[in-house]
Image: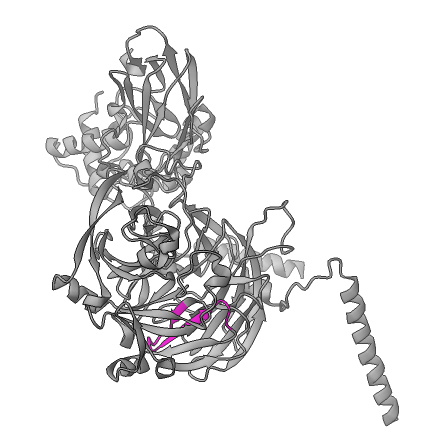
């Protein structure tokens, strides 16, 4: 009987592990993160968009993040060198899942102790903030 | 053999009876707890993490608030501050919310709130707003059901107690009000003995803007000086009419218990508000001077403003024939409830032993055929026999209020005999009854006063609690009881305690409200003049002896959090803006020696506390609402000096 149960459990694990071998699993979460953003096409820097992003950043993000220094949360000057554009936008739009699933974000939470929260921004807002970060690459 | 069987049967039966008797006699309290069936627990159990089926809104009575419960669990979710200050979140204490409680009598931080009524569209609750009356300092409040916050309070002038309120018309065209106590109209210094000469009753119609919800006093009707008690609106065929009960047609001013109970019948006033609208449009009103306040809260400035109003349009029934008719109704009528079809008007009589039910069709016919029994101040009295559809006999003593289930049944609370009585609309036969513990006042069926009741449950709102719960000294909580009305027989399911003294209540399917629920206030839309939208805007500004601190809050720090340059005697306005944009992350603010409540600031909101330091020193402040792992670190200091030290704070140093 015990053997039978073990077998059944084994089969279940097998099924779960093999279930849904879809494209989703081939997606490089380590690079792009978890969230609604799968691909971002970057062009030359759009200064107007970056200015808009800066405005939103100052209202909604600066209580924790600064561009030029570590504050409550990591310094964001140069973040575009460290992370992919998709990762950055997913972190802004979907922080709860990112913190749960991404190994890098988990490490950051352990270091800073304050979980990043969603600040009620749209995809467009997040894109604008990304553009602003691109202008801060060397800060 | 046969004989033996019978003997055995009787032996068994006697044993069972004996066991019941012994157990009954030995039960610790010996009190009747009410029959509860074995599946009751299952019916009220809402598993952890799952939701209730209905929101119930209970009036707080003398607490002045509305409490929000889940049905069937009876779990308390929220107390919405309406007429009373609430130190738990600063309502009525903060600079932003103090104007909500302004009246022509000054700042009144308390009221007696009796009858909540959900806004309706086509006679059905639509989940936009809920209104509730303030009885003592006559007012009507509107609560926004996206935010569950009080957004507006309007005072009702020329009114001695706003009891017959805040009932809506089927499309929320109006919220009605009528005075429980007649008073000199306009108020003046007259002898109480001259009651009959000077005292009048006012019925008021408050127009509701369909987009903003904003209320305005459209007109008042000058009524004979009786006591107006409760109201409900007509619907379907009776759309365009409202029904108000009145007692004290004796016009007594002393010992009403005896002197207002002499007449065999008082009245229901049937008011044709469509005709009133026409009369107002035709200019058949008088303008009367009066003083009343109108307070409006704005979700973008996060602040309330007060306007003072000084006149009202008044209609006199003598000058508008056909505006009002009196329906004779026995024994100090109380509740007046219109059935879902709009045809029947049931009336509770505080001293009655039957429920008179009037027919709207018969009323119209009696008006056409002029079946009058005299008139009072130009208001024709219809003949009782010409309007009555039926009398519900054996309905218990002191029937007060009736609600409907939409399946052709009505449920009436009987106060004196402490029971709920179920009867069939049309046959007027009582089909079931269940005791209440104890002394039921109002009762409520979800949607039970609308055109399409949701049914399923009934909540008995009892006046006496006594031994229902563990004792808590002389003062006990009030007791509500949930009754299953889905079958032929009513079944008691659950007792649960309530705050204040609930009078009427309303309930609405949860999904109607959940989909519109607002989780945060968008920070970009914050138009508070002292908001700091982002840490960049955090600052401290001195203006004479007023110091304005523009302070931000986020997990888990304030900015600024070190402030110097405040002097003894300054008025320190601490304007806190919560920068969070995440659901359920309020921050709190308290500072040593603050003279009133804390601040509780919702995401994206700004709230202001005025602090007047009396002695030099360094005063700590902190976040009162646990917000993160580093919540204990969310704190700061304000230095208070006697000498002129320039203002400085964190980054400005």
Image height check: is B558 above or below B384? above
Residue at image point 36% right, 70% down: B268
Residue B388 can be seen in this image = yes
Residue at image point 13% right, 32% down: A45
Percent x, y for residue A96?
38, 40
* Quarter of the N terminus of chain B within the rendering: bottom right
The number of numbered discs placed on residues in the rendered structure image is 0
**Viewer-proximal residue among B328 and B630:** B328
Percent x, y for residue A8?
57, 60
What residue span does the magenta drawing correspond to? B336-352
Q: Quadrant of residue B222?
A: bottom left
Image height check: is B242 above or below B641? below
Percent x, y for residue B581?
31, 38
Residue B348: in magenta span: yes
**Viewer-proximal residue among B316 and B138:** B316
Percent x, y for residue B207?
23, 57
**Viewer-proximal residue among B430 and B628:** B430
| Left or right placement of residue B365 versus residue B66 in this view | left
Residue B128 can be seen in this image = no
* Quarter of the C terminus of chain B within the rendering: top left
Residue B196: in magenta span: no
| Left or right placement of residue B198 versus residue A43 in this view | right
Residue at image point 41% right, 26% down: A112
């Amino acid at each position: 009987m015990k053997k039978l149960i073990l077998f059944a459990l084994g089969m279940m694990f097998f099924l779960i592990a093999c279930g849904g071998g879809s494209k989703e699993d081939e997606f490089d979460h380590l690079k792009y993160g978890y969230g609604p953003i799968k691909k971002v096409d970057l062009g030359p820097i759009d200064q107007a968009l970056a200015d808009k992003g800066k405005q939103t950043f100052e209202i909604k993000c600066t209580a924790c993040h600064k561009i030029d220094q570590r504050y409550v949360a990591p310094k964001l000057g140069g973040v575009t060198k460290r992370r992919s554009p998709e990762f950055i936008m997913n972190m802004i739009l979907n922080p709860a899942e990112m913190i749960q699933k991404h190994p890098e974000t988990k490490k950051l939470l352990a270091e800073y102790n304050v979980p990043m929260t969603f600040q009620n921004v749209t995809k467009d807002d997040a894109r604008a903030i990304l553009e602003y970060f691109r202008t801060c690459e060397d800060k | 053999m046969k004989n033996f069987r019978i003997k055995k049967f009787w032996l068994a039966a006697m044993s069972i009876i004996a066991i019941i008797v012994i157990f009954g006699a030995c039960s610790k309290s010996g009190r009747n707890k009410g029959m509860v069936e074995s599946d009751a627990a299952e019916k009220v159990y809402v598993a952890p993490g799952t939701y209730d089926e209905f929101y119930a809104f209970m009036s707080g009575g003398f607490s002045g608030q509305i409490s929000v419960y889940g049905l069937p669990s009876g779990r308390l979710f929220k107390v919405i501050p309406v007429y009373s200050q609430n130190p738990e979140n600063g309502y009525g204490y903060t600079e932003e919310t103090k104007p909500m409680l302004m009246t022509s009598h000054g700042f009144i931080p308390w009221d007696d709130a009796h009858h909540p009524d959900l806004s309706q569209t086509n006679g059905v609750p639509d989940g936009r707003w809920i209104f509730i009356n303030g009885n003592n300092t006559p007012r009507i409040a509107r609560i926004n059901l996206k935010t569950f916050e009080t957004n507006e309070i309007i005072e009702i002038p020329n009114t001695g107690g706003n009891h017959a309120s805040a009932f809506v018309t089927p499309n929320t065209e109006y919220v009605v009000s009528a005075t429980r106590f007649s008073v000199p109209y306009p108020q003046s210094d007259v002898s109480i003995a001259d009651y009959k000469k000077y005292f009048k009753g006012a019925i008021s119609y408050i127009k509701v803007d369909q987009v903003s919800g904003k209320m305005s006093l459209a007109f008042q009707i000058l009524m004979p000086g009786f006591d107006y008690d409760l109201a409900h609106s007509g619907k379907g065929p009776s759309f365009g009419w409202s029904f108000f009960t009145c007692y004290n047609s004796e016009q007594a001013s002393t010992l009403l218990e005896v002197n207002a109970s002499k007449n065999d019948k008082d009245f229901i006033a049937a008011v044709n508000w469509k005709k009133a609208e026409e009369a107002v449009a035709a200019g058949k009103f008088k303008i009367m001077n009066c003083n009343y306040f109108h307070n409006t809260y704005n979700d973008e400035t996060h602040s309330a403003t007060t306007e003072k109003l000084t006149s009202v349009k008044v209609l006199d029934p003598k000058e508008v024939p056909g505006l009002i008719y009196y329906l004779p109704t026995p024994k100090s009528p109380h509740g007046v409830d219109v059935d879902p079809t709009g045809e029947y008007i049931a009336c509770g009589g505080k001293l009655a032993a039957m429920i008179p039910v009037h027919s709207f069709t018969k009323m119209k016919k009696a008006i056409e055929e002029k079946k009058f029994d005299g008139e009072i101040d130009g208001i024709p009295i219809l003949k009782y026999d010409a309007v009555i559809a039926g009398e519900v006999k054996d309905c218990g003593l002191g029937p007060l209020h009736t609600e409907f289930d939409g399946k052709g049944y009505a449920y009436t609370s009987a106060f004196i005999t402490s029971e709920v009585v179920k009867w069939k609309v049309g046959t007027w036969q009582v089909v079931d009854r269940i005791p209440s513990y104890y002394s039921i006042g109002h009762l409520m069926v979800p949607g039970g006063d609308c055109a399409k009741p949701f049914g399923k449950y009934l909540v008995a709102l009892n006046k006496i609690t006594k031994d229902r719960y563990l004792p808590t000294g002389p003062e006990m909580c009030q007791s509500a009881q949930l009754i299953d009305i889905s079958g032929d027989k009513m079944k008691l399911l659950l007792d649960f305690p309530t705050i204040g003294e609930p009078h009427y209540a309303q309930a609405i399917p949860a999904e109607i409200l959940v989909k519109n629920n607002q989780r945060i206030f968008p920070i970009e839309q914050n138009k508070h003049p002292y908001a700091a939208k982002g840490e960049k805007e955090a600052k401290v500004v001195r203006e004479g002896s007023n110091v304005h601190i523009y302070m931000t809050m986020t997990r888990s720090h304030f900015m600024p959090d070190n402030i110097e340059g405040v002097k003894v005697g300054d008025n320190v306005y601490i304007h806190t803006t919560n920068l969070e944009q995440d659901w359920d992350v309020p921050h709190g603010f308290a500072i040593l020696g603050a003279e009133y409540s804390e601040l509780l600031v919702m995401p994206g909101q700004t709230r202001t506390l005025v602090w007047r330091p009396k002695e030099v020193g360094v005063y700590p402040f902190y976040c009162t609402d646990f917000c993160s792992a580093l919540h204990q670190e969310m704190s700061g200091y304000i230095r208070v000096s006697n000498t002129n030290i320039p203002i400085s704070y964190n980054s400005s140093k």
